[in-house]
């Protein structure tokens, strides 16, 4: 599984990078063989003023043999946003894999 981290205007530290890698690794360890690539997009959406949902984490996953899909989380703390996005991604991947299994069982 490839992991690509894109950071727009967010200052990325080694700690944040480690948190992203650890969170995605933990969330997807049970389905790692089904995923070819995960792209992480971190952004700070403060345009003219600060608000509670300034930080955005978008995760795009590519399952083998399927089209890519994305999940997104927003919040004030980038670490919490990454954790929420990886939880969403884990649930979405599990749903897609289960859907694929059910379709292959149909006559």
Image (spheres, rainbow, N blue to C red):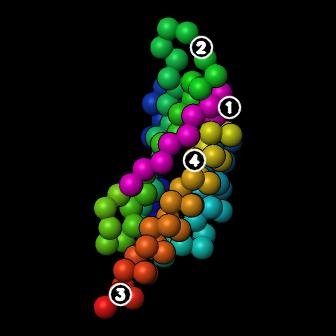
Most distant residue in the bottom direction: 107
- Viewer can see residue 68: yes
Would residue 14 be seen by someone viewing this image from the given angle? no
Sooner in the amino-acid sequence: mark 1 or mark 2? 2
Whole-percent x and y of residue 40? 48, 46
> Gap between marks 1 and 2, in whole Å?
13 Å
Separation (CA) of disc 3 from disc 4: 32 Å
**In the picture shown, does residue 68 fall above or below 58?**
below
Nearest to the observer: residue 93 or residue 13: 93
Q: Residue furthest front?
A: 107
Q: Residue at 53% x, 56% y: name it.
A: 89
Separation of residues labelled 2 and 3 (CA atoms): 51 Å
Residue at mark 4: 85
Q: Residues within 10 Å of mark 3 (few under 14, many from 20)?
A: few
Residue carrying label 3: 106
Ranked by sequence position, the earlier of labels 3 and 4 is 4
Q: Which of labels 2 and 3 is toward the front? A: 3
| Residue at the top extreme, as displayed | 48
Q: Tell me the chief SS of the magenta region.
A: strand
Q: Picture coordinates of residue 6 (x, y %)?
A: 45, 40
> Which residue position holds label 1?
77
Q: Is residue 39 above or below residue 96?
A: above
- Mark 1 or 3, closer to the camera: 3
How many C-alpha atoms fall within 10 Å of the one at disc 1: few (<14), some, or many (≥20)? Answer: few
**Disc 1 element:** loop
Identify which residue is drawn at 67% across, 39% down. 79
| Residue at 31% over, 72% down | 65
Pointer 3 and pointer 4: residues touching (CB < 8 Å)? no
Please give the label number shown on residue 50. 2
């Amino acid at each position: 599984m490839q992991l690509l981290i894109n950071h727009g205007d967010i200052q990325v530290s080694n700690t944040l990078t480690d948190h992203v890698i650890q969170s995605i690794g933990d969330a997807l360890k049970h389905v790692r063989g089904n995923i070819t690539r995960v792209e992480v997009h971190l952004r700070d959406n403060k345009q003219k003023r600060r608000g509670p949902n300034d930080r955005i984490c978008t995760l795009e996953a590519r399952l083998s043999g399927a089209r890519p899909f994305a999940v997104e989380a927003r919040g004030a703390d980038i670490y919490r946003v990454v954790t929420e996005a990886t939880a969403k991604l884990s649930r979405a991947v599990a749903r897609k894999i289960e859907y694929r299994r059910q379709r292959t069982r149909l006559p």
